Amino acid sequence: MTSWDKSKETFNEFGLSVALAEARAGFDEGGIPIGAALIRSDGEIISKGRNQRVQLGSATRHGEIDCLERAGRLTASVYRDCTMFTTLSPCPMCSGAIILFGIKICVLGENETFMGGEKTLEQAGVSLVNANDQRCKDIMAAFIKAHPDVWNEDIGPIAWKICVRVGMVTAPSLNYHARSTCAHTERPALHSRQSRFVQRYIHIMSGPGEVSMEGRLGHLDEKQTKCLKEFWSKFLKLAKEGESPIAGVKASKQGAEDGQGDEKKGGAAAFGGKAKDDKAKDAQAAEKEKKELSALIGKHGSEKFHDAFWEFARGENPDALCLRFLRARKWDVDRAFMMMAAAVKWRIEEGVEEIRRLGEEGLCKEDGFQLQYDKGKSYIHGTDKNGRPVVFIHVAKHKPSEQSQKSLERFTIFNMETARTLMASSETFQGTLIFDMTGFGLSNMDWACVSFIVKCFEAYYPETLGLALIHKAPWVFQGIWKILGPLLDPVVRSKIDFTKNEAALEKYVDADHLKTAMGGQLDWDWHFNPPLPDENKAQSDETGKKERVGKWKEICKEWEETTQKWIDGDEKAGEKRSGALTKLYTIRCLEADPYVRGRTTYSRDGTEVGDGRVKWVYNGKTEEAGTSADDWRKDLGIEGKCPRNGGKEGDTGDSATSGEGGAAAAAAGAGGAAASKPNGTLAKVKSKTANAVSIVTPGPSNAEKEAEAKRVAEEKQKAAEEKRKKEEAAAQKKKEEEEAAKKREEEEQQQQANASYIAKTQSAVNGAATKATEVLSPLANKAADYVPAALGGDALKDATAPAEAK
């Protein structure tokens, strides 16, 4: 194909077909099937190329680079008139080349298999069009299935090495394998033309908050896969047989009670600080976890453990959950399983699922809960440079005496669970904490609260903390840190960094993701959207709840059955788990979600879409993270849509069967869908990119859809607010009327009581007078007998004589 026939296809279709032909040629040669084409606006093909890293043994010969190399030297005006077509989202190196040569438009075949430097391209003014072409996805899926080792080599640590080799950074001694030893190495100098994505790689490689995909889904080596199988074997043994899978651990109703009260105390005692060093802390934790597993079996039983585990996993890929505990215990399977069991026991006894079910509608009725939101102490907004949701904690707004410790713990648990929902759209299922210490004083220090938060990250939600920044800590905090630092788990401690000013903070979080009050460029501030009436009405729909939760339980059962086959060596079962079954599990979780989890402020403001996606808004621009489960429905041939923000948008039903054959039938409906990305490895797509897709796809743009959705949401919010005000006014009027009626009734009762009192008093006086007369008359008569008449004796007799005698 050498020319563009305008009567048969659009310019984008033509260019992508040229690039796809190159990808197919590369596939036939045994190379990575990524093709590229550089085409002028009139349809002239300037150059075309394909990824030849395998064919040429090259470290840098990606499709776009090969295409540019074959084009030779061109003038700047030619590049400006060209569009770069590529079958896959360009990596950071290729994105840099596109920017360097001044190419203004880039059309990519797809970005589900891999997302590269799209954000960098947009920031440099390059217009992006995502064709979302299934042919491009299929050829990549076929290659990855056949050559996973080659693909992992291409997209893994090699990305950093490429940046070094092409001279984009001057750090030849800094490499992937030396990351652990260079945490405190001075960061390398950068060339003036270096893009932000290169800064991101330097940041990742050289300090707290570094991101590594090692030991995560899609990045497991043979030993780690074996550990995961052993972990699941222990789970199935305990769940099905009710027996401890750990040698030497027997059921007991007495858990690790020692030291539990320490968390309520102040100072170092809040951390149960008996262990003197990290090794002793680890041994102490191991002993406690062993006791907790014993108590879990003895007090709650295997059935309760089984159900609580799956409730824990709801909303997260089950394998990803297990891997978090395995990484936390350095792939010691027994330790990891005991740690998980202890976390499950804690969830049962703290009522975590009930906290999730209540949501803000229920929890805001509890004493001290809404106060945390109203004061803006803590909230989640935006992401850091690694795509992780950021939790802001303004420490100076906290006063320990304003709420009970229990209320604060329930608030913390609820926000941890909410953050898990938002983290599901990030690549690593982690979040970043920023402790804003501006205005901090000793009156704000709450040892028990800090202890509980640390305990959550160490024991109950391991590996979910990506980075913790202590921002603008005053001198008084230095003394606190000298006590606190050594008490922390070494893994948690390694993820903490101090930022003294805005420039230091922006090494981790982009300025346009930080609000102006913290020195950033984001014109935004926290506002708590109160719960809406009946926002959790789905929980009252017993029929719908039974159906949705029932389907979720069926897929959990199918997961266990398929996992057992995978453990026994069935390769097809392994493919099913990582492909169709993972997708179907995610769909069932999202369908059941509004029936078992209360809504949050992030549901109401549209941040949490409800179908697996998360949308962050920065100064009017929307960044979207995650993959809609509705897309997976299409892949699996399942009809309907997932609920939005707890509602029932469209038909949430489906035509696929569940149970043993559910995922298999879905996979068949998808034509044997290729293995998907794990739930946590989800692409981020900015709305600007999505708008470009509308050039190819007819209908309203995503921005228009978002604007309309926002308008509808605002109208609903306004209507709800007006309804709330009317209800409050009516309630106030009714209250005033009731108080007035009550006051009148009380006055009448008081008058009656007064009259009754007067009557009783008068009666008592009269009775007393009569009684006195009866007593005194005989005495007076007797006295008259002894009084001479001359002295009035007769008169005395007359005066005391009874009336009838007179």
Image (cartoon, grey):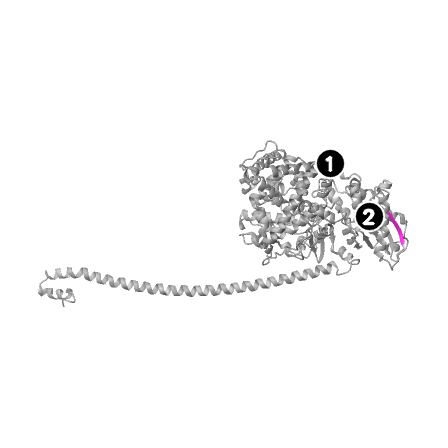
> Residue 448: percent from the left, percent from the top?
56, 44
Q: Position of residue 454 (x, y in %)?
A: 61, 43
Residue at the extreme bottom: 806
Judging from the image, what secondary structure is the residue with disc 2 in? helix
| Residue that numbered label 1 is attached to | 222
Chain part drawn in magenta: 45-50
Residue in the foreground of this view, choosing between 147 and 797: 147
**Image coordinates for residue 24, horizontal then vertical, percent:** 85, 47
Within 10 angstroms of label 1, few (less than 14), some, or many (20 or more) residues? few
Of callouts 1 and 2, the N-terminal one = 2
Residue 48 counted in the magenta span: yes
Residue 426 shown left or right of residue 760 in the figure: right
Q: Main secondary structure of the magenta part?
A: strand
Residue 94's disc is 2
> Which amino acid, mark 2?
Cys
Nearest-to-viewer mark from 1 and 2: 1
Amino acid marked by disc 1: Glu
- State the CA–CA distance, disc 1 to disc 2: 31 Å
Answer above or below: position of 125 versus 581.
below
Near-viewer residue (753 or 227): 227
Q: Residue at x 18, y 59 (%)?
A: 775
Residue 59 is situated, as x and y percent measured from the top left of the image, at 83, 41
**Disc 1 vs disc 2: Cβ atoms closer than 8 Å?**
no
